[in-house]
Image: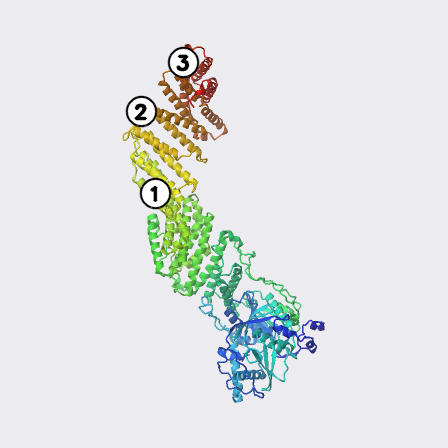
């Protein structure tokens, strides 16, 4: 089986011991390697793909290496040894590799410098030494100890020098828990291992060799050997101890949130080169200090010193090969020495290194090892912010991964882990960097949120308030407050609500029965402390053995907020945490406003009187506008003593602004749910936040002023809705006074800076309608004033239009409110004579509101609303006219000039409204409404002039002319043909107008007004208007009495005409015309009968009789009166026709038609006389008789009536 494995290209682990130099591979394995494999490698052939891009280098331009002469003694130091040199550049001696020791936080230094790569497209960030050590695990027996941290999808690897750690632990008491754990579980006989003399000797001659190589002249400068030895070792030790220095009580520089470049102390990027190395599909950010020279066949070579007596083994070969790949160096130059004396040089191409004698290895296997280790780490290091420890004991085959954070938590002190701070800072910086990128879309929000939550989890609130405040602010920024509503549920493609970004299922491994293959392992149950175990390093060479089946989710789920309220509440929770963090960092006992004797506690009732009515409001508004003006200059007045410009000041400003926005959105949401009390509570909090912001702000941004204008606009809306929903006031009041603990705490933080009373005038819940309306109006006015301050008006035209619309609307509401009050006063004083001063005062107020409102609408060219307000002004004028009309004496009353004046003003306003609209198409409903009001005004004027003719001032003819003109104008604006809900009203109005005009002309005729020509005109007009009135009344089902009255007037008109006729034929013709009119009234009687029957049936149904009585449809007295007139007129006409027919019969010969008519008329007449004589008959019976007789009349008189007047 071993053989098969080898043939597949998987080497067996070397059998050698030795920490640095294991033995070469078994000889059979060597021959298996094909010779040509290396050449394909570097060119990116099918074996292994490698690509390196230098991201940063502090190395000077490459100098050609000086080839040392044979027999040069490397034990003697060169003249330039350990001195600064221009050729070395800023990195000093590090470049020559004096210390291979990597610093414990080296990967963090690199991560801070290349924050863009972290968490995103890079898999690993580490020192090249650590990467080499990992890739050599299957070949080497030496121990491996590394700290692993996950940031997003990136792993940071750092050497965790256990020896150094425990040495420090015995001095400081840190890490004792780890020391105990290590001794119990891994190495019970642990003690500090001393480095051998041989180790220091090798380092010294390597250092001298490199200095000789850059020196060029090769001149040696002898130094006493004891001193030399001492100097070399001391320089090395100082470097060593510095290399492992742990930034002890790690404190954050104060500028971290503002200046990402200011890295935390001790976490510098110390590498000469930072390289982005892509090995196969693994992207790594690697730090390297390997010296690179010019001078070979290629532009770059690496220089190595080899002891001729020791052959190269696989470990060294892999080392050299990886170093060259990482640094993109195509050639290796080896200098061989014996006991420090230079022997010879040899040059090898990088791609040939894997085929060197004694150090033959398969690059494919190295690739598999890299992929397996990465998959193993990615699958198991799942928790961000945790410190994982990858450990392999010396000589062991088992690799274990521990979660130190979890182990540490069991010791109840999470700050004993020195990695906590750098990890937290890095999480914070990566999140910051992702937030900065404007083009980032929402898919990264989940990742950012997880980074920040983990960062906050790691930090001590008292020690790092700034980062915590800043992280919480960024968390609040992730939630879009001003999203369009429709997108609410599509916030994240992932619908699981997860707090951790990565799946936390740990790799389940059967580790309970794994005894391990080395003696130091204690009982098996201890292994369950490990997160994961590689049972044998040999597994790492098996291709895709650890192919990550636990595919880490690339970004975490962003919580799905199902509604706006939930989203805002989340934002506020982060804001509150941020505020607490800021406040705690400046808190002194005497800081709280309550304890400050110079600041009075704001008491709510103090200025209740001043705030009572609109007058108090005026004062408050003046103060407010004064304050807004001073903000432009930048007045600063914090009570807690924050220094302007300090991080606390900047952060608190941001957080307060965020809270005000969140409360505004909450208020808006409550408003759309019609929860007006809650909406007012939220807008109050938004305005209190804003007030505090104003107190702290030294330079007010126009964007913030715009917010304020929006808040006040919404506040105005809420106050208006509260005014209009007075019926539900108790519920609104209860909602207004309710407060969550979170809101109280935020308010407490605001009170540390200001009294928050700046907008009290706008947010009080009043119970008085007038003051609610005026507060609403003041809110809009203030919002408008703010827009005037800077250039906001032109920058935000939409908002400006909204504010003016609302101002116009509220002024209309207030105008209507005063107008209704005036109308109410008017009805109360029906008894008294003159108009009261209070009424006139209300008219003035109402008129002024309408006028301002019209101006608002006209300034934004809103013709429809301007027309509505003009229409309301017209209505106000009519109320004024009515007030003057009721002031006169009922008996001697005449239409007064004041009434005429106000009615004409009303007409003017209605005509203006029509002009404002222009055409009906603009807004048909408003257009029709204005037309109707205009028609009504003309009609009222005409009616009043007709009924209370001002004869003391004008001649009868003049009055009739004016009435006629007004009536015709009323008809002009009364559209009877337009099909709408108002059509029956229009028809009734038009019918009434025709009826009144006909009556007027009829009356003129009777009173013998004017000459013959004029009287003829009057007769024609009367007839015309009567017939039009009848036509219109017949269209209506609910005006039978009016129809009957008009018909009776027409009959009277016919009778009047008959009096002036002399011939019997003419009289007979007029009579038959009059009887025909009588017949046509049957329709009206049928309608009356139908209603009487319904009324008669209804009381049996129960309680509905009052409704029937109150129904405007039928007036019984009116019906009885009209019926009596009708009966008398009918009997008169029948009698007259009988008389005339009888007299003509005597004179002329027999006329059968006339005989028949006479006969039927006599019958009808006798029936009528009998019916009217019966006094006990009910109304319904009387109507039935009339309907029956009219039927007979129509039937009997059909011959004559054919030529009758319509």
In the rendered image, residue 127, in percent from the top left (x then y), is placed at 55, 73
Color theme of the render: rainbow
Q: Residues within 10 Å of mark 2 (few under 14, many from 20)?
A: some
Q: Label 1: which residue?
A: 846
Tag 2 and tag 3, C-beta contact below 8 Å: no
Image quadrant in which you'd find residue 26: bottom right
Look at the image and tell me whether residue 228 can be seen. yes
- For the residue pair 293 and 30, the one nearer the viewer reads as 293
In the rendered image, residue 371, in percent from the top left (x then y), is placed at 62, 68
Image quadrant in which you'd find residue 993: top left
Q: Secondary structure at mark 1?
A: helix
Q: Label 2: which residue?
A: 1009
Image quadrant in which you'd find residue 698: bottom left
In the rendered image, residue 657, in percent from the top left (x then y), is placed at 43, 58
Position of residue 52 relative to residue 1077, above or below, is below
Q: Residue furthest left?
A: 952
Q: Secondary structure at mark 2?
A: loop
| CA distance for labels 2 and 1 | 46 Å
Tag 2 and tag 1, C-beta contact below 8 Å: no
In the rendered image, residue 594, in percent from the top left (x then y), is placed at 38, 59
Position of residue 1011 relative to residue 674, above or below, is above
Total marks in image? 3
Q: Quadrant of the C terminus?
A: top left
Position of residue 675 relative to residue 1152, above or below, is below
| CA distance for labels 3 and 1 | 68 Å
- For the residue pair 225 and 942, the one nearer the viewer reads as 942
Nearer mark to the viewer, of 3 and 1: 3
Q: Residue sitting at 49 percent across and 73 percent down?
A: 266
Label disc, if present, on residue 352 of the rendered structure: none
């Amino acid at each position: 089986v071993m053989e098969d494995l080898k043939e597949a290209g998987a080497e067996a682990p070397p059998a050698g011991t030795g920490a640095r130099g294991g033995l070469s591979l078994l000889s059979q394995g060597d021959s298996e390697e094909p010779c040509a494999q290396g050449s394909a490698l570097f060119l990116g052939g099918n074996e292994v793909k490698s690509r390196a891009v230098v991201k940063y280098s502090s190395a000077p331009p490459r100098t050609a290496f000086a080839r040392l002469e044979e027999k040069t003694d490397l034990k003697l130091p060169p003249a330039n040894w350990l001195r600064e040199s221009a050729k070395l550049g800023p990195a000093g001696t590090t470049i020559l590799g004096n210390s291979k020791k990597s610093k414990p936080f080296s990967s963090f230094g690199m991560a801070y410098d290349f924050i863009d790569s972290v968490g995103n497209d890079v898999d690993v960030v580490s020192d090249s030494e650590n990467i080499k050590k990992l890739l050599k695990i299957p070949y080497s027996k030496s121990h491996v100890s590394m700290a692993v941290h996950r940031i997003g999808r990136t792993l940071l690897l750092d050497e965790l020098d256990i020896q150094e750690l425990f040495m420090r632990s015995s001095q400081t008491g840190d890490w004792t828990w780890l020391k105990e754990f290590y001794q119990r579980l891994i190495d019970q006989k642990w003690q500090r291992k001393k480095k051998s003399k041989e180790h220091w000797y090798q380092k010294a001659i390597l250092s001298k060799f490199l200095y000789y190589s850059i020196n060029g002249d090769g001149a040696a400068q002898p130094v006493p050997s004891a001193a030399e030895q001492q100097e070399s070792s001391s320089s090395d030790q100082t470097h060593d101890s510095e290399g492992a220095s742990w930034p002890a009580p790690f404190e954050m520089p104060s500028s971290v949130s503002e200046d990402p470049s200011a890295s935390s102390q001790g976490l510098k990027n110390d590498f000469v080169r930072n390289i982005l190395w892509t090995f196969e599909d693994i992207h790594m950010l690697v730090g390297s200090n390997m010296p690179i020279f010019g001078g070979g066949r290629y532009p770059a070579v690496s220089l190595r010193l080899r002891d001729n007596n020791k052959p190269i083994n696989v470990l060294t070969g892999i080392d050299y090969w990886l170093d060259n790949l990482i640094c993109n160096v195509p050639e290796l130059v080896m200098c061989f020495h014996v006991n420090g004396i230079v022997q010879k040089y040899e040059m090898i191409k990088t791609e040939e290194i894997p085929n060197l004698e004694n150090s033959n290895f398969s690059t494919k296997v190295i690739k598999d090892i890299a992929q397996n280790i990465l998959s193993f780490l990615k699958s198991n290091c799942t928790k961000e912010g945790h410190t994982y420890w990858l450990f392999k004991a010396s000589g062991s085959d088992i690799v274990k991964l521990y979660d130190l954070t979890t182990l540490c938590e069991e010791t109840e002190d999470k700050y004993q882990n020195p990695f906590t701070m750098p990890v937290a800072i890095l999480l914070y910086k990566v999140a910051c960097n992702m937030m900065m990128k404007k083009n980032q879309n929402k898919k990264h929000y989940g990742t950012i949120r997880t980074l920040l939550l983990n960062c906050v989890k790691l930090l001590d609130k008292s020690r790092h308030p700034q980062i915590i405040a800043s992280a919480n602010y960024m968390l609040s920024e992730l939630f879009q407050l001003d999203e369009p509503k429709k997108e609410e549920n599509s916030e994240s493609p992932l619908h699981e609500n997860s707090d951790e970004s990565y799946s936390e299922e740990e790799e389940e491994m059967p580790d309970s029965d794994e005894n391990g293959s080395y003696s130091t392992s204690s009982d098996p149950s201890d292994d369950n402390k490990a997160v994961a175990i590689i049972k044998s390093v040999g597994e790492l060479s098996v291709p895709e053995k650890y192919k990550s089946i636990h595919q880490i989710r690339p970004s975490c789920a962003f919580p799905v907020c199902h509604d706006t309220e939930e989203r805002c509440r989340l934002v506020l929770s982060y804001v509150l945490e941020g505020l607490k963090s800021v406040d705690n960092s400046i808190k002194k006992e005497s800081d709280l406003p309550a304890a400050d004797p110079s600041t009075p506690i704001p008491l709510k009732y103090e200025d209740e009187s001043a705030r009572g009515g609109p007058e108090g409001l005026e004062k408050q508004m003046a103060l407010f506008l004064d304050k807004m003006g001073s903000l432009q200059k930048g007045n600063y007045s914090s009570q807690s003593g924050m220094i302007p410009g300090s991080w606390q000041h900047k952060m608190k400003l941001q957080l307060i602004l965020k809270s005000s926005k969140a409360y505004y959105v909450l208020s808006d949401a409550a408003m759309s749910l019609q929860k007006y009390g809650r909406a007012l509570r939220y807008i109050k909090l938004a305005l209190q936040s804003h007030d505090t912001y104003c107190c702290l702000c030294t330079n007010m941004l126009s964007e913030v002023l715009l917010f304020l204008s929006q808040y006040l606009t919404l506040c105005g809306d809420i106050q208006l809705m509260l005014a209009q929903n007075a019926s539900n006031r108790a519920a609104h009041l209860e909602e207004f006074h309710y407060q969550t603990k979170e809101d109280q705490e935020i308010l407490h933080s605001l009170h540390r800076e200001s009294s928050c009373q700046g907008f009290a005038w706008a947010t009080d819940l009043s119970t008085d309608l007038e003051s609610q309306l005026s507060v609403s109006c003041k809110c809009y006015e203030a919002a408008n004033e703010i827009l005037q301050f800077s250039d906001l008006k032109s920058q935000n035209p939409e908002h400006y239009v909204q504010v003016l619309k609302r101002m116009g609307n509220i002024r209309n509401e207030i105008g209507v409110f005063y107008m209704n009050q005036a109308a109410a006063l008017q009805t109360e004083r029906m008894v008294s004579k003159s108009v009261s001063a209070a009424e006139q005062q209300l008219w003035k107020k109402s008129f002024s509101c309408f006028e301002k409102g019209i101006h608002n609408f006209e300034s934004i060219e809103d013709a429809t609303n301007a027309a509505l307000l003009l229409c309301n002004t017209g209505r106000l004028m009519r109320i004024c006219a009515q007030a003057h009309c009721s002031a006169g004496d009922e008996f001697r009353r005449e239409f007064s000039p004041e009434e005429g004046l106000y009615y004409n003003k009303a007409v003017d306003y209605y005509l203006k409204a029509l002009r404002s609209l222009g055409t009906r198409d603009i807004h048909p409903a408003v257009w029709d409404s204005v037309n109707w009001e205009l028609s009504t005004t003309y009609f009222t004027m005409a009616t009043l002039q007709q009924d209370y003719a001002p004869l003391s001032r004008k001649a009868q003819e003049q009055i009739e002319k004016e009435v006629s003109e007004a009536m015709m104008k009323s008809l002009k604006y009364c559209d009877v043909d337009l099909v709408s809900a108002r059509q029956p009203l229009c028809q009734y109005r038009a019918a009434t107008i025709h009826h009144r005009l006909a009556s007027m002309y009829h009356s003129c005729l009777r009173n013998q007004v004017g000459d013959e020509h004029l009287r003829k005109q009057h007769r024609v007009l009367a007839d015309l208007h009567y017939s039009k009135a009848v036509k219109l009344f017949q269209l209506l089902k609910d005006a039978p009495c009016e129809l009957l009255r008009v018909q009776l007037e027409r009959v009277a008109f016919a009778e009047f005409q008959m009096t002036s006729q002399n011939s019997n034929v003419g009289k007979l013709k007029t009579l038959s015309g009059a009887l025909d009119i009588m017949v046509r009234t049957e329709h009206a009687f049928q309608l009356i009968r139908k209603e009487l029957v319904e009324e008669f049936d209804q009381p049996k149904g129960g309680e509905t009789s009052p409704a029937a009585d109150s129904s405007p449809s039928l007036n019984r007295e009116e019906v009885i009166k009209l019926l009596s007139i009708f009966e008398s007129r009918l009997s008169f006409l029948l009698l007259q026709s009988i008389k005339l027919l009888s007299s003509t019969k005597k004179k002329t010969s027999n006329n059968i038609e006339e005989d028949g008519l006479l006969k039927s008329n006599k019958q009808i007449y006798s029936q009528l006389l009998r019916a009217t004589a019966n006094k006990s008959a009910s109304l319904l019976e009387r109507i039935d008789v009339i309907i029956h007789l009219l039927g007979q009349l129509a039937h009997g008189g059909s011959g004559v009536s054919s030529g009758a007047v319509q």
